[in-house]
Amino acid sequence: MPGLRLQRRREVADEALVRSLFSEHGAAMLAYATQLTRDRAAAEDVVQEALVRAWRHPDSLVNGKGSVRGWLLTVVRNIVTDQIRARNARAPEVRESPVEVAISDDHAEQVVNSVVVVDALSRLSTEHREVLEQVYLLGCTVAEAAKALGIPPGTVKSRSFYALRALRELRSLSAAGTERSAS
């Protein structure tokens, strides 16, 4: 039992030491660490580490080689210096390069499609082409296209139907022609 009491007294004394060091020198340590690190959270970690070192080596505080505050501030500076050296000693962290995304559509294919559409539209009658331009290229409703073209809405519907049918026929003819030339 006497060994247990002695250990408990030492723990209470150690805790009292750390509390008194922090209450007396904590503000100065935190200000100095913040000045060195330029980061409040990192400075708080440094102060905590300095107090742990003081707790582990209480004899260093009373060895008569200067003031307690001087010793604590030296420990703070040494901790920050060690952190900087450790950061500089290892290779800088490099982010992973982004995974290259496969190109979904080839620009050349879009150009070819545009040429094919323009060619097909040029083969339609003027009336059919105008209706498709209003409805599909300009995004007009049937009523808006009818008003812009000066024709009834029913005519817009029938012309767009026959224009699309003509485009499909042209596409199927060109596809058949391509198959024949490939054979």
Image (spheres, rainbow, N blue to C red):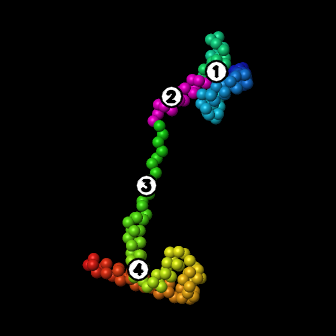
Q: Amino acid at mark 3?
A: Glu
Q: Which residue is mark 2?
A: 85
Which of 127 and 140 lies nearest the eye of the viewer? 127
Corner quadrant of residue 173 = bottom left
Please identify the dominant SS of the magenta region.
helix
* Type of amino acid at the residue the image marks with label 2: Arg
Residue 115 visible to the viewer: yes
Q: Where's residue 157, x and y in %? A: 54, 86
Instruction: Say few, some or many: other residues with alpha carbon within 10 Å of mark 4 (under 14 / 14 to 19 / 20 or more).
Output: few
Residue at mark 4: 122
The disc at residue 72 is 1
Q: Residue at x 53, y 29 (%)?
A: 84
Location of mark 3 (residue): 100
Q: CA distance from mark 4 to mark 3?
A: 40 Å
Percent of width and height locating residue 20: 73, 22
Local SS, label 3: loop
